[in-house]
Every structure is written in structure tokens, then in C-alpha cells.
Amino acid sequence: MSEVEFKNFIEDIIDGDLASGKVTTVYTRFPPEPNGYLHVGHAKSLCINFGMKAKYGGKCNLRFDDTNPSKEDTEYVQSIMRDIQWLGFEWDKLLFASDYFDVMFDCAVLLIKKGLAYVSDETAEQIRESRGSLTEPGKESPYRNRSVEENLQLFYDMRDGKFADGTRVLRAKIDMSSPNVNMRDPILYRVLHATHHNTGDKWCIYPMYDFAHPIEDAYEGITHSICTLEFEDHRPLYDWVVNNCDFPQPRPQQIEFARLNITNTIMSKRFLKKLVDEGKVMGWDDPRMPTLSGLRRRGYPAAALRDFCDRIGVSKANSEVEESYLQSCVREELNRTTSRVMAVFDPIKVVLTNYQGSETLRVENNPNEETVTYRDVPFSNELYIDRADFALVPPPKYYRLKPDGYVRLKGAYIIHCDEVILDDNGEVKELRCSVVANSKSGEDTSGVKVKGVIQWVDANTCVDVTVRKLQSLLTDVVDGITDFNLRFNQDSLKVVTAKVEQSLTTANVEDKFQFMRIGYYVVDKDSTPQNIVFNEIVGLKDSFKPTK
């Protein structure tokens, strides 16, 4: 019996369009506004749009919707391109909305000539007040019935810089009584004397997104304009623009899906920018930030993000996904791909009284590799173990090191604790231990059985590194308080020092490791030859419980 292929509703629509002959090649686009860095919510849209390209052997453009020069910057353009390529996608064409400003202007002139657009002298506040409500119709503009000739002249005057910002707009003439507020003579163009990152000072009027976007799609030959659910009420205006601007068939079809929401995760570019501007984070790529740049710096693998987006699927209903689900996907990928190394965060010195000299041990990197590889780890009679792995007064069933107890050092020997040396405050200062004869890992004939295996580092060759312990930028919602400003986590970053294996001195930026029995960590770009900096990626424990 063959497996049933489950398809989402977008694929059902595309399959129907292909079967009917409405389209022959699937053509999508990813259209970010370059006013900030992409965040994890954009990953879902990227995976859908580029996923349709891959599934149907189609095309997908990267198009920057740069119609608001006062908020846009080439820094954001470059960061978006980097993030998309890092996530594993390649666009067919790199385009800008500003490439079509002449086309959009001509479309606006066409609408004026058809009697479907007019220049209004109303202020933005006056237009808002006259638009009506969900229960009351709007009021027609006193300028709605200007002649075609007057509207054309005024629109040319807008283009030629004869009006100040906010004094004239071009509005569509549709229906001020429409139950859809978006159809109540929406603004198509506004006056804005601002230098554009791409066109400089050529234009002092700029199209609104709802006017520009359908024109861009139609002009490029996009077949399926896939966007998030908040644009569903804008679809009638989208169709009105492409139909009345006389674009040839087949015209693009807008399809909406539910955006990605993750618990305790900021999905607002405006608030993320506020954190950057106020210096509350180290920039757009701060490893605590949910931007794609931040997640990359934190060590999240691109493959894990793609897997996460695939698992949560595509739906028409808004919902919130547990942050732990994403972390589970990250952990699963890292468990498969990262080398294990040893690190000690709170060291206790161990002196092996019956061991002389030193040696180099061969320790496996990752037991999950198809072909297991090994690294060299120095070993001598002075080591460090983590304080959490020794108990002066152990609880029942304690399998780590204790007075007169045994434990195995990972990849090395079984040791016995012979003596505990305390400092003046009664804290453990040093452990005197002995190596059990013939207990070397892989060659053990000692007959001594132990249940505990702990990590360690060689005291003579280990390296001190800086480690950033990271938590969410937001605290949990308490008493219904959802305001990001009130939920900012002041303890989201803690910096500690750890001792690690000598092998990590050759690690490169973005190299990822599992610190055995602790968690996953990545080398940060702030590292120097004198000080390696690690960012915590995720812990070893998986708290995500899939719904049955």
C-alpha cells in the first residue's frame, strides 16, 4: 500500500491551477520591506514561498518592497540577502519595488483617466475621520468628483514637487459604503520628500503598499502571491488594482496563511528596533534576538529552522507554537551533527596520586556519526571536574564522585576518591584520588563496575573561555500582562567562565559543540586568540512534549 501524500491548502490551490491550465509554471516571491532584520517569523514565509518553487519546479523572486524611504536602509537590504542565503534559499531574480516606480506612476495615471482615482487635499486625520467604522459607512471626500483633467494636473504637480508633505494624496475611487473598510477610497500615493536608498531624489511621491504590491506581482508574472493572514481583508483591493490596471491574464492570486507566533518570542520589527536603538541588546544579531541573524549567531542550524517550519505546517488559523518546539528541532539537529567536548563550569581540582607523567587519549567526537571520529585529549595527574559532580554528603542513589567512592572519567579511567581537602570556609578545595589499575576506557579489565561517568579537563592544558548563558528576552505572561516593555527580561544574559579542552583553541566562529552533560554551544564572533567566547544554544534536556 503506497503512502498517502498530505498536502496543505496552498498546494491544493496550486494543484488545481496547474490541472486546469490556469498556470503552467508556479511563480512566487518573498517581498520583505527593508526596514529591519528578518526574524524567525519570516522563516515560515521563506520556507513556503521557496518551498513551492522547489516542489513544483517553479521560480521565486526576492523583491524588496521599498516604498517607504524614511524607514528603509541598505543595511537591511544586505542583511536580508545574507539571511535568506544562510537559510538555504536562492532567488531567481533580485528586484526592488522601486524598480517599478515608473510603472506604478503610469498605472495611477491610467486609473485617473478611467475616473477611478482622484487627488484629495484632505489631511491624513480628515481621511481617517471620514472613513467610517465597521458599522457606519464613510463620507465621500469633497474632492471626489474633480474632473479627470484637474486630477491629472494635480497628480503631475505632486510628482513635480509642488506640494508639501501631507498636503495632497491620490485616492482610489471605489465605494465609501463598502463593508470592507479597505475599499473605502484607499490612499494610493502620498507626497513624501525623502531621499530613497535606491532612487535617490528622483521621486517625491511614493505609492502605498496596497497599491504597489499587486502591481509588482502582476508585472513580474507572479502566479501565487502568498502572504500572511492580516492581508486577507486587503485581497479585494489587491484584485481591484490588478484588474483595473489592465494587466494581462493570468493575473496573480493572493493566498493568505496564518503567521508564525512563538511563545515568549518578539515578532515585531518595531519593538526589536527599539531594543537595538535603546542599547538593550548588542545589535540586531544579538544571540538573544529572534532575528535570523541573531539565531545564526546563537548557533541555531539553518536545517533545524527549515525542519521546524515544515513540522508546524501551513494553516489558515492563527495559533501560538511553544518555544520549546523550536528548541527541540534545534537540539535534534545538533545531537546528530555536533562533536562532544568536555567543559567544566565550576571546577574542583583533582590530583591523581598514583598516576605519573601524562598521555594523550583518543576520545570519540560523536557516537551518532555514521563513521565515528576521534580527537586527542591530554591527560595528566592533575585534572578539574565540575563541583556539581562531587558530593561531600551524597543523597541516596548518587552515582557521581563522593568520599570513598568511584566514578569513571569520560574516555579515561575509573578513579577512587581517597581524600577531601577543605578550605578555611569548609568548601571543597581539592580531591586526592587514585586511578584504578587496568581501568582505561576501551581496555578495562579491572572488574570494577561503576554507574557514573563524568566529564573532566586536564589542568595543565585546559583553556579558560567566556560563556554567555542565554534566556528569552521576554518573561512569561503573568496576570495577563503582555506588554513587551513590561516583560523585558533583565536577566536574559549572564556571562561566566569555563575551563574547556585544549582542542577548542582551534575552533572557528560558528563552530558548534556539545559540552558533555551540559548543553550545546557555539563560538561567537567576539572571540579573540586570547579569549574564546561561546554562546549557549540550547540545553541537553528537551522539555517539549508533542501532543498525542
Image (spheres, rainbow, N blue to C red):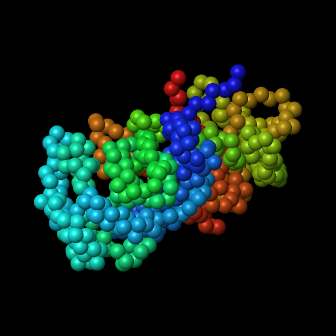
Q: Nearer the viewer, residue 304 or 10?
A: 10
What residue appears at the point 53 percent right and 57 percent down from the top-left corner? 61
| Residue 212 in view (yes/no) | yes
Residue 265, percent across and down? 42, 45
| Residue 165 in view (yes/no) | no
What residue appears at the point 83 percent right and 52 percent down from the top-left corner? 359
Q: Nearer the viewer, residue 349 or 296?
A: 296
Vertically, is 223 above or below 13? below
Q: Nearer the viewer, residue 151 or 57?
A: 151
Question: Quarter of the image holding residue 388?
Answer: top right
Image-based side of 203 in relation to 52, left or right: left
Vertically, is 41 above or below 297? above
Image-based side of 202 in relation to 63, left or right: left
Residue 415, percent across and down? 75, 38
What residue appears at the point 80 percent right and 43 percent down from the top-left corner? 372
What residue appears at the point 48 percent right and 50 percent down from the top-left corner? 250
Image-based side of 362 in relation to 252, left or right: right
